[in-house]
Amino acid sequence: MSKRVVNKIVAFTLIIATAVFFQGTGNSYADIPKTTTPNPTISNAVVKTNEQVTNKQTTNKTNVKVNVKKISIDTVTRKSGTISVSWKKNKKANGYRIQYSNDKDFKNVKNKNVKSASKTKTKIAKVNKSKNYYVRVSAYVKKNNKKYYSEWSNVAEVIAWNTKWEFAKNSKIHTDSPTLYFSNAAKKKNKTVCVNAGHGTKGGESVKTLCHPDGSSKVTGGSTSQGAITATSINGGTTLADGTREATATLKLAMTVKKQLLKEGYNVLMVRESDDAQLDNIARTVFANNNADYHIALHYDSTSSNKGAFYISVPNNNKYRSMYPVSKNWKKHNNLGKNLVNGMRSAGVKIYGSGSMAIDLTQTSYSTIPSVDLEVGDKRSDHSSKTLKKIAIGIGKGLNKIK
Ligand SMILES: [Zn+2]
């Protein structure tokens, strides 16, 4: 008879806690590790190994597993020394923690708590208008008197005007701040796209700025006539056939493009996210020049034929094309425009003729990065969410093709 061998089965239970990284300590945040990138992801998960004689899992009360789903920032905007922050709701959370700092690594960080899951916005008052602010948000769940935090959201940076920037002195309206949103996508493009919702600056029409940085005259007509030395710093835009203001339509499109590009891994610099941003065309261009890799301004043309989308190309005029900074960038502007129109065409957006029209624009005249005015349609063009999504996808496709 063979002897019965008793095998002792040792089960190893590996518990990987996905969100037990930070345990709340009341008002002290000394346990929060310093990060080195403006868009941190947490990789050092807590790993716990239990050696047991059965496969029955035991519960260790000091290591409660709490998964707190990460949230993302919706908008961060600064107006008159107050930063408004809004984010996506986490239904299972008990509240949110907002962090802000002048430092990209969140040194000397300040915290603000929102003690409600349904409240998804807050204001940070009395901020310094001449400084940049980095903002991030996390959700928390309370269990056994402890707070369990989610990973950080994507980071948003409010950018202050810098008088030392090239052409800064040519701008007359620049009291508001664009916001740079860092992508949280798994695959990052490491490129920043300035999305400029055309128009939307109250009082912009009563202020004049130089059409060209060197004071020379406009080589084509447009909203300002040929030969002009100065033009309105930014005009009010047109009104679409259904009564929607162009500035409202371009803002809705800009928000759609922002969402799409962040998803695709681009960082996005938003010139404005409200009806009024005190930033003239030169200020918008200077902000883009210094904080982005591409500048895309969104517009609807003032015709009423539903003629389709096109980009404003750089006029084929020797004097204009040899004027700095147009001289160094006009080929890049046209290349960006061509790619965007091709991308939109492949996404099913209606395109006007060959897809371009040559006009001497203030934006082009001051751009030191690839920069284009995209007329996505005209007064009769459909601007439903479905069409805006198509345009946004097309813009993403176009950017992805740029060499
Ligand atoms: Zn326009």
Image: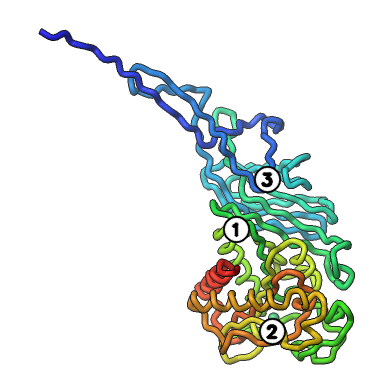
**At which x and y percent is residue 178?**
74, 62
Residue highlighted by disc 1: 189
Q: What SS does tag 1 mark?
A: loop
Mark 3 nearby-residue class (10 Å; few <14, some 14–19, many ≥20): few
| Label 2 sits on residue | 238
Quadrant in the rendering for residue 303: bottom right
Q: How far is mark 1 from mark 3, CA to CA?
A: 15 Å
Residue displayed at 74% across by 66% down? 288
Q: Nearer the viewer, mark 1 or mark 3?
A: 1
For the residue pair 115 and 287, the one nearer the viewer reads as 287
Element under disc 3: loop
Q: How far apart in space, not on screen, are marks 2 and 1 (Cα)?
A: 34 Å
Amino acid identity at mark 2: Thr
Q: Earlier in the sequence, mark 2 or mark 1?
A: 1
Residue 81 at least partly seen: yes
Residue at 69 percent of width and 51 percent of height: 122
Q: Which residue in the protein does label 3 denote?
A: 37
Q: Where residue 261 sits: x, y (%)?
A: 58, 63
- Please, what is the three-letter code of the amino acid marked with disc 3? Thr
Between the residue at mark 3 and the residue at mark 2, the CA separation in whole angstroms equals 42 Å
Q: Residue 367: horizontal and vertical position, in percent?
A: 76, 72
